[in-house]
Image (cartoon, rainbow, N blue to C red):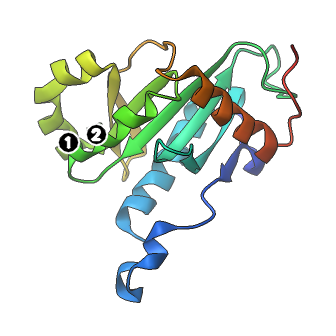
């Protein structure tokens, strides 16, 4: 298994919305723990050919729980985000898959692929709405935190986002956060 560099994942959201809530509500939530566990499992599968971050903000399109920019590179070494890059946005929920689907739809404006990640028990009930996920072009994965296993129920093909300028803004955020420089023309 490849070694995962700590610099491959960054936190993008500076102002945390939950800090606006009373102290009792602002403690580390189970959803955040679920999200971080998923990120570790995902990196174990795909960590050698990309970079990303959690709480990824693209103004006007919400805060994605996790965004991953993957590229085909010969040696897995990232020097810039220039060539063919696939931006995947993930939305994670512990219970309300409908809410996750609504939020994930916003990410289709800036990402090439959008995926909802749910615990296995919630994912089984969401599988009943798989035609809806397919129609919207949003993937459905299940994650078992205790085992660290990801089940890919439906993964959409990468396609152009609804707003290519928002995608460029997202890539610019990644470039600046990872100090990758400007894109070559």
The part of the image, by quadrant, that contains residue 106 is top left
* Label 2: few (<14), some (14–19) or many (≥20) C-alpha neighbours in 10 Å: few
Q: Residue at x 43, y 45 (%)?
A: 148
Eyeballing the image, is 163 above or below 35? above
- In the rendered structure, the answer to whether residue 132 lies left or right of residue 38 reads left
For mark 2, give the secondary structure.
helix
Q: CA distance from mark 1 to mark 2?
A: 6 Å
Q: Residue furthest bottom?
A: 23
Eyeballing the image, is 19 above or below 12? below
Contact flag, marks 1 and 2 (Cβ < 8 Å): yes
Q: Quadrant of the C terminus?
A: top right
- In the rendered structure, the answer to whether residue 139 lies left or right of residue 172 reads left
Is residue 48 something one can see in this rendering? yes
The part of the image, by quadrant, that contains residue 134 is top left
Is residue 27 something one can see in this rendering? no
Q: Residue 163, labelled with which disc?
A: none
Q: Residue 102, labelled with which disc?
A: 2
Q: Residue at x 39, y 31 (%)?
A: 115
Q: Residue at x 61, y 25 (%)?
A: 165
For disc 1, the marked residue is 98
In front: label 1 or label 2: 2
Eyeballing the image, is 22 above or below 184? below
């Amino acid at each position: 298994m490849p070694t995962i560099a700590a610099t491959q994942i960054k936190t993008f959201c500076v102002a945390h919305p939950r800090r606006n809530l009373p102290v009792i509500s602002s403690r580390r939530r189970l959803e955040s723990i679920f999200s971080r566990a998923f990120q570790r499992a995902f990196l174990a599968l795909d960590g050698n050919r990309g970079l990303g971050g959690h709480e990824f903000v693209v103004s006007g399109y919400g805060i994605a729980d996790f965004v991953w920019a993957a590229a085909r590179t010969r040696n897995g070494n990232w020097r810039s985000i220039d060539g063919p890059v696939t931006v995947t946005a993930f939305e994670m929920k512990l219970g309300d898959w409908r809410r996750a689907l609504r939020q994930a739809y916003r990410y289709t404006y800036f990402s090439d692929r959008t995926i909802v990640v749910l615990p296995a028990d919630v994912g089984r009930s969401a599988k009943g709405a798989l035609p809806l996920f397919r129609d919207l072009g949003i993937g459905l994965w299940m994650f078992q935190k205790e085992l660290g296993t990801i089940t890919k129920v439906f993964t959409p093909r990468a396609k152009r986002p609804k707003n290519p300028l928002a995608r460029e803004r997202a890539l610019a955020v990644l470039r600046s956060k990872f100090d990758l420089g400007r894109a070559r023309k």
